[in-house]
Image: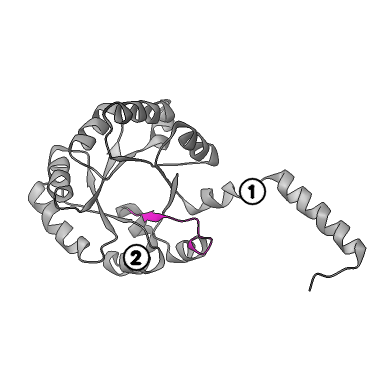
Amino acid sequence: MKFFLDTAEIDDIRELAASGLVDGVTTNPSLIMKSGRDIFEVTREICDVVDGPVSAEATALDYDGILREADKLYEISDQITLKVPLTVDGLKACKYFTSQGRMVNVTLCFSASQALLAAKAGATFISPFIGRHDDISQDGMALIEDIRVIYDNYDFSTQILVASIRHPLHVVDAARIGADVATIPPAVMHKLFKHPLTDNGLDAFLKDWEKTGQSIL
């Protein structure tokens, strides 16, 4: 499974990218707003930090508007993955750009039928928002399972990018189902490293090592 960071905070991206575990980054208008940065400036900087795809979202809703914005966003870097909404015009733009070899991330997916349409449009990534499903007492992971079955039935190349992740179990369940990518907020990414038994074991080892009076260096 690929790990993307879901943020536009460059310091968090730098810190976690240094681990070698980050395969890409996703942003959206809300994350750009939280960063307080110019979209072109911060997206360009993100592309300099990570080697993989960097999703940048078009804000236009009509086909022609999406194409105009996409031209500007794709100029930033070859790493740019255009994010488009799961609408008729969004999928029309998806088909246009993927037929040219560009990467497209179809976002705000909430049903298996929507995911099927995105795959038919040639989407590079489909982004089902599992956390928002859970917020309204629906099973977000059941959606991921449905999409996995459908895509495997027809050998679609579209990658399932699990979005709106709220906690580590979302990541584990997505991996168990066979999702291709999880886009993870930095705070959740840090939690993936943590386990109390790891901390307790490390503490015990270090205390015993100190008692030996030895030094490796």
Q: Residues within 10 Å of mark 2 (few under 14, many from 20)?
A: many
Residue at position x 24%, y 31% from top? 116
Residue at position x 38%, y 60% from top? 8
Q: Relative to 55, does residue 171 appear above or below in the rendering? A: above
**Secondary structure of residue under mark 2:** helix
Residue at position x 91%, y 63% from top? 212
Quarter of the figure with residue 80: bottom left
Amino acid type for the residue under numbered disc 1: Lys
Look at mark 2 in the image and give the residue it sits on.
47
Q: Which residues are magenta?
A: 17-27
Q: Residue 102 got which mark?
A: none
Depth check: give the residue in front, 39 or 78: 78
Q: Relative to 20, does residue 113 appear above or below in the rendering? A: above
The quadrant the N terminus occupies is top left
Q: Residue furthest front?
A: 155
Where residue 194 appears, x then y in whole percent? Answer: 64, 48
Residue 111 showing in the rendered view: no
Amino acid type for the residue under numbered disc 2: Cys
Look at mark 1 in the image and give the residue it sits on.
194
Q: Earlier in the sequence, mark 1 or mark 2?
A: 2
Where residue 26 appears, x then y in whole percent? Answer: 36, 53
